[in-house]
Image (cartoon, helix red, strand yellow):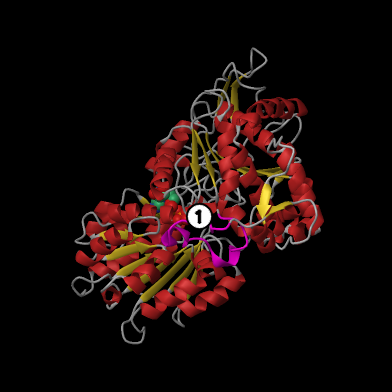
Amino acid sequence: MFRAVKATTSIFARFQPLHSPSTMLPAATKMPATRSRRSRPRGPPTARSMASAATATATVTTAASAPAAPARPQSPTRNEAHFSARRFADAPISAASKQGIKHEFLSDVQEATLDSALKGLDLLVQAKTGTGKTLAFLLPAVERLSQMELANRKISMLVLSPTRELALQIEEEAQALIAHHPFKVSHAIGGTNMNASAKRITENPPRILIATPGRLVDHLENTHGFVHLFSDLKVIVYDEADRLLDQGFRRELDKILGYMPDKTKVKRQALLFSATVSEEVKVVAKGALASNYKFISTLREDEINTHEHVPQQSMIVPFSQQLAATLAFLQQDRILHNGASKAIIFLPTARLVGFYYEALSKLPKGSLPPLYEIHSRKSQPARIKAADQFKDSKEGVLISSDVTARGMDFPGVTLILQPGLPPNSEQYIHRLGRTARAGASGRGILILDRDESFFLRDRTIAGLGITPVPQVATPGLYHLTDAELSSAAAEISKVLPLVSVETKAQAYRAFLGVYQTSIKGLGWTKSDLVAAANTFVRTALGWTEPELPSIEKKTVGKMNLKGIPGLNVVANTVKEPRGPPRQQQQQQPRAQAQRPRN
Ligand SMILES: Nc1ncnc2c1ncn2[C@@H]1O[C@H](COP(=O)(O)OP(=O)(O)OP(=O)(O)O)[C@@H](O)[C@H]1O
């Protein structure tokens, strides 16, 4: 088993104040600088890490309108670079692939897997978020295809992705890699026109297909000739393998594999990659792997978890103040990264994303960087547009559900905010992994109500070194004084009346739906849940109507809250509201069917 030995020095110097503030607000701050190329024990900074370091070294001046300045993080981070000393130029790969790769050194996971993958072995691979797993599976697979006799007009490589955005991102990376190969790549993802993708794929079959499971099953079952395209499949990749193998996708995966050629007749390679691979996943994964498969982890023996190198903090505030705390941290991040603050706020459901987005958009113009919103209730073109705009933005705030929590590579993200209970420790880690990618730095803050604080005692989470957000300015940490929280709360109280009643009602129902799945951990009874939601709607969402938002009888039943007093239960509407098209629902995992959509 490969276990990489990593450089222990940070590629970033500590945050250093340039000079003291001459006013109440600090004047300027120097952000982390990269170590000189000479002093790097391993590969040099890449274009991307250079770019993010350049951003990070910008001098920071506070805006006049900004709140009291945060203490400058003195970077307790030991943000390691995950690059090996092996150059792509020296790797046993084709000139065509070399031309398509823009990096100089292989990352640790690329180095650790290349030789085994080139031999055609099945692999189960675990490596930290943002360390180049995509190229680690694309490169050897493309190399092997380039040396094989391939049947004409067949798909030779299938990459499965749990989300549409990730599928498109993988396609883009594959496109760059194969630019000098005689291969084509295409996608099959939900939320797009089924007939158009059927035509595109069957009329001109790509050598590589990137697909989300739901849409792929749809094509296999309904598109004439589709199954036949896979009769010579050579490689199947499961990106975010643990997610694909969990209950939510199990049925789709079984169907997909049922349509693929018999492995004993057509030999194919399986590559399973993720940042989180639990012992249970290892057991389930065996079903997708040959018996002589290799498990490769680039985590060191002493690394208890995947992301402890990103400084993380937690803040306990009542539900009613979580939005205000979120705003205060966004403002601090803006001061710290003058003109280059890129934050993501992760929320557990589409409706709560909608509420945060609407509320924050009502703040006076210029209060925050541009806001973007992504969740499953947005149309696919709107999701793609928001993801692209946030990727390309110099500064911005993305408010998102978990549809972007895995795999998405948004450059230069400085802060991950997680208000409210994350679904589980794996999801916390993947969300956090949207920052500090490819050797860059970044931070995370988890904002919990006291009742949600049990999450911090989860075995994995407890091992991550999460430190509390101090209530006084403290070097090296984001902080939140009572005055700052009150000031943000005052700003929020002005915008809540501007948020639509429907948005608030939907967020209220989403709260009930999400928290009912965690009442055991929260130590709540069903009555406690209803009481918490009823307080939440008035204090956090600013609901001022005399009657609470209504909930249909059938929804109450689905939430297991029948007979619990305190809800405004109404009869079911006669006609079922029309759901989104079938393919748009396919990423909704079955195991979470009781939870509201994300
Ligand atoms: N050898 C390399 N040198 C420098 N940068 C690299 C290298 N390989 C990949 N990258 C860049 O690192 C970033 C993260 O890569 P990628 O998205 O593949 O990470 P990942 O490990 O799959 O992350 P996640 O676990 O979040 O899915 C991308 O911007 C990619 O272009």
| The CB of the residue at mark 1 lies under 8 Å from ligand 1 | yes
Q: Main secondary structure of the magenta part?
A: loop
Q: In the orientation shown, which residue stands out farthest toward the bottom? A: 264
**In the image, is residue 107 part of the stretch drawn in magenta?**
no
Residue position marked by numbered label 1 in the rendering: 406
User: In front: 201, or 439?
Assistant: 201
Question: Where does residue 111 sit, x and y in percent of width and height?
Answer: 41, 61
User: In front: 235, or 204?
Assistant: 204
Question: Where does residue 407 sit, x and y in percent of width and height?
Answer: 47, 54
Residue at image coords 62%, 62%: 594
> Left of 354 or right of it: where is 117?
left
Q: Which residues are magenta?
A: 574-597
Does 453 sit above or below residue 471?
A: below
Residue at image coords 65%, 30%: 497
Query: Which amino acid, by three-letter code, is at mark 1?
Result: Arg
Question: Where does residue 581 sit, x and y in percent of width and height?
Answer: 43, 58
